[in-house]
Image (spheres, rainbow, N blue to C red):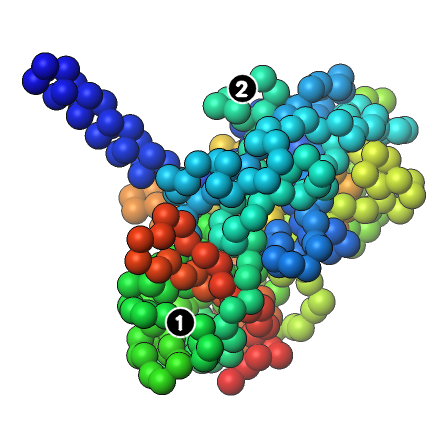
Amino acid sequence: MFRVGFIAFIYFSLVSFTCQALVYENTIYSPNIKTVQLFPKGSDMAMPILNMGQNETLELHFDDLSASPKNYYYTVVQCHSDWTPTTMNVMEYIDGFTEANINDYDYSNGTKVPYVHYKLEFPNNDMQVNRSGNYVLIVYEQNKENPIFIKRFMVAESKVIIDANVVYPRNLSARNQYQEVIFKVNYKGFNINNPTTEINATVLQNYRWDNAKLNVKPQFIGMNELNFDLNGKLIFATAGREFRYFDLRSLRFRGQNIRAFDIRDKENDVYLLYDKPTQSDKYMMIKDLNGQYYIDNLDNPYYNTGADYANVHFNFDLGSQVSNGNFYVIGAFNDWKCDSTSILHYDALDKSYTTDIQLKQGLYNYMYVLKNNQDNSINPFITEGYYMDTENDYTILLYYTPFGERYDRLIATKFINSIINRF
C-alpha cells in the first residue's frame, strides 16, 4: 500500500511540475502554415484583446501552403498572467463546445504559390469564454496535443482606471537608449484586500512578448491608488530611428525599399535594398507600423486569397564579420523570434549578412539584432542605433488574483504612445 501511494505521489508531483513548467507561446509547428494572424475584427494590427460585455470578436487568418484542404480544429486553454496553464476545468471558462472545427476556407486565386486560406471568428455560436484573463487558441488537425500552431489572446474587464506616461529614464547613462513607463491605478470602488499579493502587471512595447515585463508589482500603495513608478525597472530599448520597412503590395511595380524582382513560373524572389547600421544616422520621424505588418495586394482586390508569396532577400551590409554572436531579422511577422528561420548568414564575397524568408504580399516593418553567443542577450543598438524620442506603442495589462482564486483576472488595459503620452 505504501509503495502504491509513494508511486502515485511521485506521478502527481511530476505532473504538477510539468504543468508549472509549461509556458504557452505564439508558435507555429508546421512548416506549411504561414501568415498566422489573430486580431480584433476590423483592426488588423491591433493586439488580440476582447473586452467583456462589448460584443467583440477576434479574427483568425492563416494559410496552408500544402494547397489541399484539411479538417482543422481549435480549442482554448486558460492561462495565468505568466502564460502557464491554470488548474481550472475547461468547462468552467468555456460556454458551448470545448472543441470545434474551422470550416471557413478558400483556395488562393491567381497566385504562383498555391495555398488554402482559413478564417475563424471567435467567439462564435460554438464556443465562448466567460472569464477574463489570458488564453491561448490552439489549432490542430487530429490531436490537440500535437498542434499546428498556438496564438495568445486576452479577455479584459474594465474594473479600475490606469493613468500612464512614457518618461526619460532617471539614470543619465540610459537616457538616450531607453524609454521608461510609469503608471498609477485608481481602484476606488473595487475591493482589493492585499495589493502586493493580489495585483501584478505586464507591460509590453509594440505588442512584443519577447521583451515584455511580467509580474510587475506596485511600488507604493495609497488610498485607492497603486503607484508603479519603479525608477528604472520598466525601461525598454528605443532601438533605432523608427523601423525599417518595405512595400511588397505589388509584384508588378517595385514598392519602397525593394531593389529588384525575379519573377519566375512557380515562385517569386524579391530583393530589398542593402541595409546598413544606422547608429550614426540623424533621426527622421517617419510613419511606420511600430514593427507590425499588414497583408495587402495592389494587383488583386482579394488580398486574403489573391496575395502571392515571395522569397524576400534581406541583406545587412556590416562590412565585416562578427565573432561573438549572430545577426537576426525580426518583427511581428515572425513573432520577434531569433531562430533558425530568421538568422542571417555571412557572405564572405559581399562581406554582408544575408537570408531569405517566404512572406505574403503586404507592408512590413522589421529590424536587425545581434544575439550574443555566450549569454544569449539581444543587442539592437549595434544595428539600429538609438534615439530617445523614437516613437513606440506601449500596452499595460493589470491582473487581479484574490486569495483562493485559481486564475488571474485581467481587470484593466491601457494603451499609450511614447510621443502622445510623453511626460
CA distance for labels 2 and 1: 42 Å
Q: Which residue is mark 1?
A: 191
Name the secondary structure under disc 1: loop
Q: Nearer the viewer, residue 263 or 420?
A: 420
* Foreground residue among 102 and 331: 102
Q: What amino acid is found at the position of numbered circle 1 in the picture?
A: Asn
Residue plotted at (60% across, 77% down): 419
User: As displayed, is residue 323 above or below residue 224?
Assistant: above
Q: Residue at x 71, y 18 (%)?
A: 70
Asked if 167 appears above or below 348 in the picture, the reply is: below
Residue at the spot x=67%, y=44% of the render?
A: 123
Q: Quadrant of residue 214?
A: bottom left
Camera-near label (2 vs 1) is 1
Name the quadrant containing residue 250.
top right
The residue sitting at 71% across, 55% down in the picture is: 55
Q: Which quarter of the image is occupied by the N terminus?
A: top left
Q: Position of residue 386 (x, y in %)?
A: 50, 68
Element marked by disc 2 = loop
Among numbered discs 2 and 1, the one appearing first in the sequence: 2
Query: Mark 2 = which residue?
Result: 143
Q: Position of residue 385 (x, y in %)?
A: 50, 64
